[in-house]
Amino acid sequence: MSDLRRIAVAGNGSVAWLTAAALLRAFRKNPPEVTVVDTGAGKDARIGHWTLPSQRGMHGLIGIAESQLVDQTGATFKLATQHLGWQGNGSRFLHAHGEIGAEFGGIPFYKYLVSVALAGRPERPETFSIAGRAAELGRFARPMGDAASLTQSFTYGFHLDERAYAEYLRAHAQRLGVKVAGAPLADVVMSESGDIEALALADGSRVTADYFLDCSGPDARLIGKLAAAREDWSAGLPCDSMWSVAAAPTADPPPLTQTMAIESGWLWRAPLARATMVGIVFSSRFQDDAAARDALRGFAPALDTEPRLTRFPAGRRREFWSRNCVAIGASAVELEPLAGADLHLAQIGIANFVELFPRGRDSAIEAAEYNRLLADYADRVRDFTLAHYHAGPARDGAMWRAIRAVPLPDSLAAKLDLFAAGGRINLLDHDSFEEVDWAWLLLGAGRATASLEMQIRLHLDKLPAPAVDSLRTHIERLTASMPTHREFLKRQGVSPRGPG
């Protein structure tokens, strides 16, 4: 049993409330006292999130009913991300949350797609995907049936309004027993030993704790006092800023996020039940704030409110856990939201802190292991994000040429080279993205392959063409039978609001 009985969580967004709720649920048989201290407005002003499917698991762990969450926050479901223009004007590809086809003799179906591409007969992965086709058709249903069925071959994430989500999580956390400090953070009080002693509040009071979790976002109000050193990724990932805003809703919100590459970054659109989130992610080295805001207004001209500006110079901390402070979320890792992994990385931080929860204040061993693990997880998400810029044909433009000029991390270079040589995808330890995720990206982006492993080719020669045609037809029928995304949301108690 741990001697640590008091934990302070510094932050006011969804990451802070997820962290606080998760701690109480993880130790509910002998819960610590968890207090959230509001850190006020900071650099992270994003309008919302699109998430990975892992968010479903987090909701289950902290006891959230999904239908209630969707109803009360106006969230929508996410089956895929559609990328437009990343390999040049007119290009497009999809990354869906689910399998491509079905295994044949233990061989992933994407190998078949590699083989037909080599033969000059390329096929789109989404043709053989429940999630991909449903996303294209604007339809949605939850997975169902036994584990081996096609109707269980996909999963989904969410589109979430940050303010509504944070308010929902705050209410849920307080019901679990999380306490809320009576005033916002004013200062961090350090002890002579170099630990954090307390958080000084604006009303003159203090919150003392055994451990302090920094969920204050890029401001890093706590961890910045103890461990300032960062790994800088900005040379290869120069997009460091984002304008985002809520725009008018669409009549039939699709269950997908859309990105569109432009000269100095990329635009994005993600539907909510009663609004549409839009934004522009850009590099301040290649475009100033005003020009980026104008580009966003051209993309979504009918805006009711002013866009919010967020900064996130790409990189991570060298120490996520220092003394009695642990950085969670954007206070630990800053990265453009392309992969939708911001909340996922926060979950990884929370889960590993729970698993390595120390017995006492002397936690150097646990901290060293935590820092090793989180560095690996962060670097793998960095690689997946970078691969969007390098996997296929190059897009023209000064920013895009500058990105391609920077040498890739060895881990990503080896992965891309191996796929190009023989269509093989190797996963590293602590890779948040599965083999099929990499297949969606590499096939969709047009990463060319020189050949396919010999033993795979021999097996694929036995794959009958009628079986492929039958699979394609079966998926088309299944997805056509799904309700529209809009209709499914209505069944959850949500009333989507169309234009006008």
Image (cartoon, grey):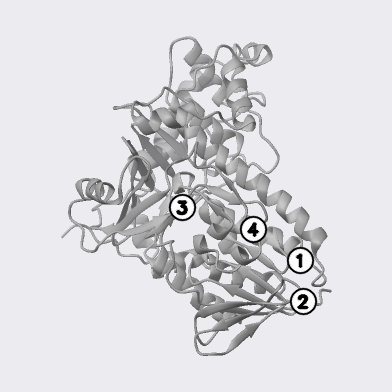
Q: Amino acid at mark 1?
A: Phe
Q: Residue at coordinates 55% horizontally, 80% vertically from top-left?
A: 174
Q: Closer to the camera, 376 or 167?
A: 376
* Disc 4 from disc 3: Cα separation: 18 Å
Q: Which residue is mark 4?
A: 349
* Disc 2 from disc 4: Cα separation: 18 Å
Please say whether residue 180 is visible from this viewpoint: no
Q: Secondary structure at mark 3?
A: loop
Q: Closer to the camera, 281 or 278?
A: 281
Please say whether residue 84 is visible from this viewpoint: yes
Q: Which residue is mark 2?
A: 4
Q: Amino acid at mark 2?
A: Leu
Q: Amino acid at mark 3?
A: Phe
**Position of residue 397 measured from the top left corner of the image (x, y, whole percent):** 33, 29
Q: Residue at coordinates 56% horizontally, 47% vertically from top-left?
A: 145
Q: Secondary structure at mark 4?
A: helix
The mark nearer the N terminus, 4 or 3, is 3
Q: Is residue 240 left or right of residue 232?
A: left
Where does the C terminus fall, quadrant-wise?
A: bottom left
Number of the front mark, 4 or 3: 3
Q: On the image, which quarter does residue 324 sit in?
A: bottom right
Q: On the image, which quarter does residue 245 sit in?
A: bottom left
Do tag 1 and tag 2 residues touch (Cβ < 8 Å)?
yes
Vertical placement of residue 386 versus 496, above or below = above
Disc 2 crowd rating (10 Å Cα; few below 14, some 14-19, many 20+) is some
Q: On the image, which quarter does residue 382 sit in?
A: top right
* Disc 1 from disc 2: Cα separation: 9 Å
Residue 357 is marked as: 1
